[in-house]
Image: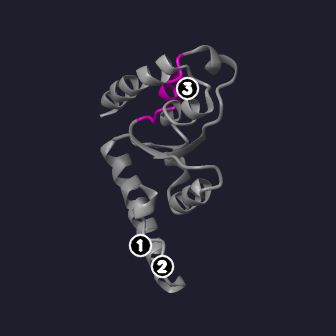
Amino acid sequence: MLEIIDLTQKLDKDEYTRQVDLYQTQIRLLGYHLYHQQRPCVIVFEGWDAAGKGGAINRLTERLDPRGYVVHPIAAPRGDDADKHYLWRFWRRLPDRGNIAIFDRSWYGRVMVERVEGFARTEEWQRAYQEIKDFETQLV
């Protein structure tokens, strides 16, 4: 799939700055509307290590009201989280109404990283597809 990406596309610095400014303004307005409509929002970042997720999150949140969002960096489960179902640690971090939860990595790790690295048994990651679908259906 990555072979179809056109790696020759570029933005000059001025156009990049203009677009970042535009989208940061739009995301700030989105945060405002979410708060006033009392709607929660979940934003998920996935990608390879050092792919730029952290930088993208920083640019995304630069103009957001810091009272209205939380960034959740997700690592391997530890403590109580390790003893519970893998979705537990995400479920308990879902945002309240009017707030935004930004996940730096997510529940998709079960069928990606944990599968590839052998951290989840075959039956666990296969079952995870339906569990993730059910989890996301509850979010809507």
Instruction: Identify the mark at residue 10; answer none if there is no mark.
Output: 2
Query: Which SS class for mark 1?
Result: helix
What colour scheme governs how the chains and residues are painted in the rendered image of this protein? Answer: one colour
Image spot of residue 64 (x, y percent): 50, 57
Circle 3: is it few (<14), some (14-19), or many (20+) Cα within 10 Å? Answer: some
Residue type indicated by callout 3: Arg
- The residue closer to the viewer here, 136 or 93, is 136
Question: Is 53 situated left or right of 32 in this image?
Answer: right
Residue drawn at point x = 55 percent, y = 55 percent: 57
Residue type indicated by callout 2: Lys
Q: Is residue 94 magenta?
A: yes
Query: Which SS class for mark 3?
Result: helix
Q: Mark 3 against mark 1, which lies toward the viewer?
A: 3
Q: Mark 2 against mark 1, which lies toward the viewer?
A: 2
Measure how far apart labels 2 and 3 are at the Cα level: 38 Å
Instruction: Identify the mark at residue 89; answer none if there is no mark.
Output: 3
Q: Earlier in the sequence, mark 2 or mark 1?
A: 2
Decide: is 94 above or below 105: above
Total label count? 3
Measure how far apart labels 3 and 1 are at the Cα level: 34 Å
Measure how far apart labels 2 and 1 are at the Cα level: 18 Å
Q: CB of mark 2 within 8 Å of CB of mark 1?
A: no
Residue type indicated by callout 1: Leu
Image spot of residue 95 (x, y percent): 46, 36
Quadrant assignment for the C terminus = top left
Question: Is 90 situated left or right of 97 in this image?
Answer: right
Decide: is 118 above or below 123: below
Residue drawn at point x = 35 percent, y = 31 percent: 136
Query: Which SS class for mark 2?
Result: loop
Question: Is 38 situated left or right of 52 in this image?
Answer: left
Image spot of residue 11 (x, y percent): 48, 80
Quadrant assignment for the N terminus = bottom left
